[in-house]
Amino acid sequence: MGMQGRMMLGGMGDDTRAYDHRIARRLLAYLLPHRRQLAVVLVLVVLAAGAANAGPLLLKIGIDDAICGGVQACDDPSLGNGGLLAIVGMVYIGTLGLMWALNYFQVLLTAAIGQASLRQLRNDMFAKLQRLSLSYFSRHPLGAVMSRITNDVDVISEFVTLGVTSLVGDVVMLVIIVGMMFGLDWRLALVSLAVMPLMWLASRVFSNWARNAFRQVRSTVGDVYGNLQESIDGVRTAQSFVREDRNAAAFEQTNRQNVDASVRAGAIVSAFIPVVDTISALATALVIVVGGMFVINGEMGIGTLVAFIALIARFFTPIQQLTRFYNQLQSTMAAGEKIFELLDEPLDVEDRSDAKALPRIQGRVEFDNVTFGYNGTDVLHDISFDVAPGQRVALVGPTGAGKTTTVNLLARFYVAGRGQIRIDGVPLDSVTQDSLRGQMGIVPQDSYLFSGTIRENIAFARPYATDEEVVRAAEAVGAHEFIERMPEGYDTDVRERGARLSVGQRQLICFARALLADPRLLILDEATSSVDAHTEQIIQRGLDRLMAGRTSFVIAHRLATVRGADLILVFQDGQIVERGGHDELLEAGGLYYQLYTTGFPGDETPEQTTATETTVLNRRMWM
């Protein structure tokens, strides 16, 4: 992660540390609501560890007491005790059954706790995504965001459901084994632990190698998701320009980088296993040599030596697991960094602590010397205008002039850098966003529909609207006729992003959705730019119905929509360069006149031009 990402974390991510207590503490906080179940899990883990390590002790009893009769030399078979040996065997089988049962319930309970915790984590991430400002999504590819919710959470899932309990179990196992070693013979215990400096050195070296490898894996996974999402969204464009092979090659390269990073990380982890096995073999050899001498000298029973060798084999297993846990911890820290970077992302638009609900809107809108910019560059400069309740305002101008930015500020998707925006005299920054947008109807240029039925999409803002209300809204905007022709009418599934419908049909659905919401203030962002002239005539009547009695802001390139506006604001380079009515602006002969004569696609035929416009045009021809 780069410096910018670490700054966003407030110093949370530190490349020099594999473990960050702040990330770990926040992850473990999701487990705290389940502390009672966790206590039960810990008890089960301790009991299971005790049952698992009963074997070596039973070996000692079986050999030294049952077979050798308590004689260290073990040279007289007649001293053996078959009854005791049978008891030892049955107890051993019992401990195995107990261990299986304890592990079963421990894994079952741990999985339930982990999934419940992760459900809350996903809910928190989704809720934050819903609140984040539009600027966040313009800075972060959708694929990378999806990677955090899916892949990074999966990494956390493995850590929470397996890693934490494995850590506790391995630590308990080590404590029990070391205690048993010193209980059997403190001299052999010291011999066994003599190899621990080698184990520590090997763990240190491999962990340092693994740290960067796992961070690279997390980074390249995000790149894969981003490339995949972009390629799927742009598949039509790719096919239009015959870019399939090149796009496939680009994805292959991104995918290869992720595969290479994963292989490197896996190779590092895998290489550590034979190192641990070698150190374990060294410790076993030392115990055999030293312990064998003790047996020969009569200082130790054969059973004790056999038990020690069994403990040595068990001793390095949890150490190996702890090393894997350490590597898993590094991967989890990298995933946690990305997750909490999202959760800690500051909101560009946030309600003030004293914000109040906006009363029912009458519809007066004021922009007072509003200036706004992206990344330090102003795109709006001292914008001022007043709109009376119920007026229709058309915003026109070249692409990039600031029209969409203006209505986004009105909807409070962004916050003005300077100046003030008021509705009915109330500054926008003094009211809650919900109370403001709840009285707005917004129809964007890309008519976005959600997966589901036509009925559900129309009733999106009013989920409890009756079927009659949904139908009336569709009839008002001219959508009812084509909906009735669909295979299942209003219950037709539109599929993802409304793929089953044409562009014009999707826009009609969006108009019906806005009408059903009954907004007091309406924003139409080039909502008719993608429909043909016939469809525009159908929805124009619906627009008139939709805008009746409401303050409306229309960004449009079609003359039919612009000409009926009470006020036209002409934007250029982030400023309002002209304002007035249609005829007035034509008479002025400025930028609006140029747009009218050259810039409005889908204009009416010459026969539909008004007499005033004809007079103006004739006058221009002779100037």
Image (tube, rainbow, N blue to C red):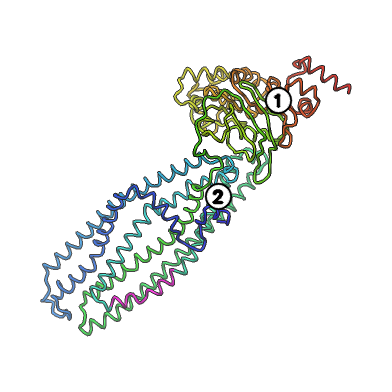
Residue 194, magenta (yes or no): yes
Circle 1 SS class: strand
Name the residue located 29 percent from the left edge and 56 percent from the top edge: 42
Q: Which mark is residue 510?
A: none
Q: Nearer the viewer, residue 505 or 243?
A: 505
Q: Earlier in the sequence, mark 1 or mark 2?
A: 2
Quadrant of the rendered image containing residue 202: bottom left
CA gap between label 1 and label 2 equals 46 Å
- Magenta stretch in the rendered image: 188-203
Mark 2: which amino acid?
Val
Residue 131's x, y, as percent? 51, 39
Mark 1: which amino acid?
Ile
For disc 1, the marked residue is: 568
Q: Nearer the viewer, residue 522 or 470?
A: 522
Name the residue located 41 percent from the left edge and 52 percent from the top edge: 27
Which quadrant is the C terminus positioned in?
top right
Residue 111's x, y, as percent? 34, 49
Q: Nearer the viewer, residue 243 or 11?
A: 11
Q: Which mark is residue 224?
A: 2
Residue occupying the far bottom of the picture: 297
Name the residue located 51 percent from the left edge and 47 percent from the top edge: 342
Quadrant of the rendered image containing residue 329: bottom left
Q: Residues within 10 Å of mark 2 (few under 14, many from 20)?
A: many
Say above or below: 83 vs 350: below
